[in-house]
Image (tube, grey):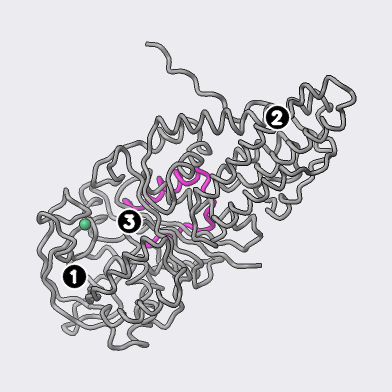
Amino acid sequence: MPRFYLTTAIDYANGDPHLGHALEKIGADAICRFHRQLGDEVWFLIGMDEHGQKVAQTAEKAGVEPQAFVDGVAARFVATWESLGISNDQFIRTSSPVHHARVRELLERIFTRSPDDFYERSYTGLYCVGCESFKQPADIVDGKCALHTTRTLQEITERNWFFRLSAYTSKLKAHLAAHPEFLEPESRRNEILALLDSGLEDISASRARFAWGVPFPRPLSDGEMQTTYVWFDALPNYWTAQFFPGSGATWPASVHVVGKDITRFHTVIWPAMLMSAGLPLPERVWGHGFISLGGERFSKSAGVKLELGDAVSRFGADAFRYYLLRDIPFDGDGSFSWERFEAVYTSELANGLGNLASRTTAMIEKYCSGVVPAGARGDLDAADLADYAEARAALGGAKGFPVHLALEAIVRTVTRANQFIQDTKPWVLAKDPADRAELERVLASLARRLARQAVYLAPFMPRKAEELWRALGGPGTAGSTLFDTADRMDCTGWTVNKGEGLFPRPEPPAAK
Ligand SMILES: [Zn+2]
């Protein structure tokens, strides 16, 4: 069985989950569910990045110990992912003792295998607490960090452990050249190639003055113990995950799904650390874009607010998942809009899939006593299968992970099936006994297409797919049906049950 180990970024425990976090987890969840239905052995890791100065400061402001603070944040993230149906196999937290021990082991490995890579140096620079990093002139606009324009940069001088990142420039270039799939989409790859062309600076690997983190394994020459720089502690989570009891993670990861703002850390610092430690590199990194609201990026520091709970409760978690993956390209940037959300829900879910399901099950109940008749395949099945092949290519990794293109292909099968009803007019066929065979062929075809749609939509709308599956009387569950099985689906003899509508039409706003 092919192994598929996917990780998302671990979320920074400095605030509550927002739409940007949700897009990444929902997209990654669809990819993992998709691979399970391909028959792959999947391990899906998400979690929390809980260390760093910013977390310590926020906890202090709130008047609690950092550990108590991050415990509370982690609980809220976990509850959010459960409500959204995220099917992660493991939730890692960097404050856990297993992670601490293994990060120190990884750093020791670097000391042992590449003794020149860590060295002591005194450094003065402008530090952004938002990024947890010193900023180079190119990253500073009007005296502020380009990513955190509301924060003040701090001039900091300290003696630290440094990592000889500069020694890896040509090795990283060579890796990117030999493995074009290592970093996608191409826009992200071009950014990193340009960065490598400009040369890499060594970076600090430890911090003085604050203790909320993983103690760096070796003291400075004057005996001072420091704390591991937050990125040197956070990035290894993908590797330390395998050492937790019960974990099925295996290194190297198949793909890291991360935002475009941290692609650099995952394709430069992280692979350099791994090379230095003599460990294999992740196979792929997928850098998705940002979701905005009215052009503003979602983030705590930018102050753009849309309560995630409001968006989820509008039409339910599955409709929210569907809208995000349908409207926000997973290889670029997109914008959340309530108007678009309502329009997509009404046209594609209520009028599209929901209507197709209710009409089909109602006709099978009315004309065939609720039992799906036998019917040969027609050309329209072949057209659907071509779309499903595209969906597989989009989510299976053949062309990166443009999740939205998979959904686009599946939507075409729904449109085609509704058109098929209009063209064949089963209610007219039902009036003439001479058309009985044709009527049964049409209804069997519709049942078969809906069953395939349930299976292929299960990665996107896991709960609604099961509702549809139950309405069709399918065996087992849609989400545990392999795509190979769905492609050969024959629903003859299934007993349908029209039940409630899948997607109730939205109520018009109440008059005041
Ligand atoms: Zn910053």
Residue carrying label 2: 423
Residue carrying label 3: 67
Q: Amino acid at mark 1?
A: Ala
Q: Is residue 70 magenta?
A: yes
Residue 246 visible in the picture = no
Residue beneath the point at 60% across and 37% down: 464
Label number found at residue 208: 1
Earlier residue among tags 1 and 3:
3
Corner quadrant of residue 164: bottom left
Q: In this picture, which residue range is highlighted in magenta?
A: 69-94
Image: 245 above or below 428: below
Q: Amino acid at mark 3?
A: Gln
User: Which of pointers 1 and 3 indicates the residue nearer the eye?
Assistant: 1
Residue beneath the point at 44% across and 63% down: 256
Image: 2 above or below 379: below
Crowding at dot 1, Cα within 10 Å, few <14 / some 14-19 / many 20+, comes out as some
Q: Quadrant of ligand 1?
A: bottom left
Residue 100 position, x and y percent, is: 37, 69
Residue 107 position, x and y percent, is: 34, 78
Image: 385 above or below 272: above
Corner quadrant of residue 188: bottom left
Query: In the shown orientation, is residue 22 left or right of residue 125?
Result: right
**The N terminus, quarter of image:** bottom right
Residue 230 position, x and y percent, is: 29, 65
Q: Is residue 216 magenta?
A: no
